[in-house]
Amino acid sequence: MSLEDQLSLRFKCAKCDANGATVKRISASGTGLSKILDIQHNQFIAVSCRNCGYTEIYNPESLEGKRHLGTILDVLFGG
């Protein structure tokens, strides 16, 4: 199961307490030269509540490659 699928299924909204989310990867430019040249080398994961639209942004580098991803998601979403 992909990271996006796991986040979508385990998400519990901090605002409305609903379950389930839409997950998308987004890119953003940095500062300085990358901003001027519009080089978008920063990757993030946006997790949006299906009920109210509240969105949380995560750094995929901190989530991917973790051996205990389930435990990390439990901490994030109170599983």
Image (cartoon, rainbow, N blue to C red):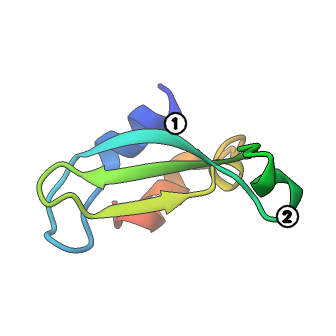
Pointer 1: residues within 10 angstroms few (<14), some, or many (20+)? Answer: some
The percent coordinates of residue 14 (x first, y second) are: 27, 72
10 displayed left or right of 15: right
Where is residue 49, by image quadrant? bottom left
Q: Nearer the viewer, residue 30 or 3?
A: 30
For image coordinates 41% across by 63% down, the residue present is 56
Question: The residue tagged with tag 2: helix, strand or loop?
Answer: loop
Q: Nearer the viewer, residue 79 or 23?
A: 23
70 displayed left or right of 33: left
Q: Nearer the viewer, residue 37 or 64?
A: 37
Question: The residue tagged with tag 1: helix, strand or loop?
Answer: helix
56 displayed left or right of 27: left
What's the distance in space between the residues labelled 2 and 1, CA to CA?
31 Å
* Quarter of the image with the C terminus in it: bottom left
For image coordinates 38% across by 51% down, the residue present is 47
Residue 3's tag is 1
15 is higher (above) or lower (below) than 35: below
Residue 48's tag is none
> Residue lying farthest right?
33
Amino acid type at circle 1 is Leu
Pointer 2: residues within 10 angstroms few (<14), some, or many (20+)? Answer: few
Q: Which residue is mark 2?
A: 32
Counting residues from the start of the chain, the first of labels 2 and 1 encountered is: 1
Where is residue 5, by image quadrant? top left
> Residue lying farthest top?
1
The percent coordinates of residue 48 (x first, y second) are: 30, 53
Q: Nearer the viewer, mark 2 or mark 1?
A: 2
The percent coordinates of residue 4 (x first, y second) are: 45, 36
The percent coordinates of residue 69 (x first, y second) are: 57, 47
77 displayed left or right of 28: left
Amino acid type at circle 2 is Gly
For image coordinates 76% across by 56% down, the residue present is 35
